[in-house]
Image (cartoon, grey):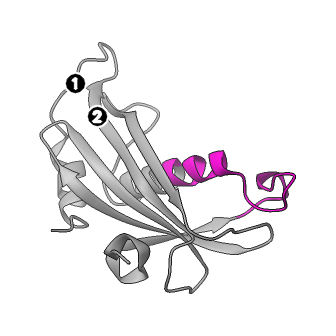
Amino acid sequence: MTDADQRSGYRYFADITSRWMDNDIYGHVNNVVYYSYFDSVANQYLIEKGGLDIHSATVIGFVVASSCEYKSPVAYPDLLEAGFRVNRLGNSSVEYGIGIFNKGAEAASAHGTFTHVFVDRTTDKSVPIPSQIRAALEAVLVN
């Protein structure tokens, strides 16, 4: 197991409410839904801790890469948590590490990465990560 597989490998947690529509015909959360969970926890963190104004900020994050490893199934109505951390922090980009856990579980049911490049909202050109957001990201950076 790696630290991405374990609750102790994450610095921030957010509750996730699984929904009936998340399940697929096999009776568990469909693989594509995990990416929605990843997106939600990353943006929740940026809004809550980094002060990101999703409606009017001049700098926003674009997803440029993502990956997920599935370890064990989860299904509605499971209570879930997303563990969040920063794996790599660059000048204009950040790679997040995210784990999906059944509420209180030590081992992740899935974990992956999600990469944002910060861009000027008007020009779509990459720009340095704003200082308030950078400080929030540094707070959850793992070595």
Is 28 displayed left or right of 25 in the figure? left
Q: Residue at x 21, y 64 (%)?
A: 141
Label 2, on which residue?
117
| Residue 87 sits above or below residue 35 on the image | below
Q: Secondary structure at mark 1?
A: loop
Given the current orientation, which residue lies at the most extreme front position? Answer: 1
Most distant residue in the right direction: 25
Q: CA distance from mark 1 to mark 2?
A: 7 Å
Q: Residue at x 28, y 26 (%)?
A: 119
Q: Which residue is mark 1?
A: 126
| Relative side of 52 to 21, left or right | left
Does the magenta segment cover residue 37?
yes
Quarter placement of the C terminus = bottom left
Image location (x, y in percent) of residue 2:
34, 74
Q: Secondary structure at mark 2?
A: strand
In this orientation, does residue 11 appear? no
Q: Are marks 1 and 2 in contact (CB under 8 Å)?
A: yes
Q: Amino acid at mark 2?
A: Val
In the picture, the quarter occupied by the N terminus is: bottom left
Question: What percent of the width, then of the height, locates residue 39?
Answer: 50, 47
Q: Residue at x 31, y 17 (%)?
A: 124
Specify the segment rendered in magenta.
18-39
Q: Toward which corner of the image does residue 52 lie, by quadrant?
A: top left
Q: Is residue 31 left or right of residue 115?
A: right
Residue 75 pos. (x, y %): 76, 67
Q: Is residue 73 shown in magenta?
A: no
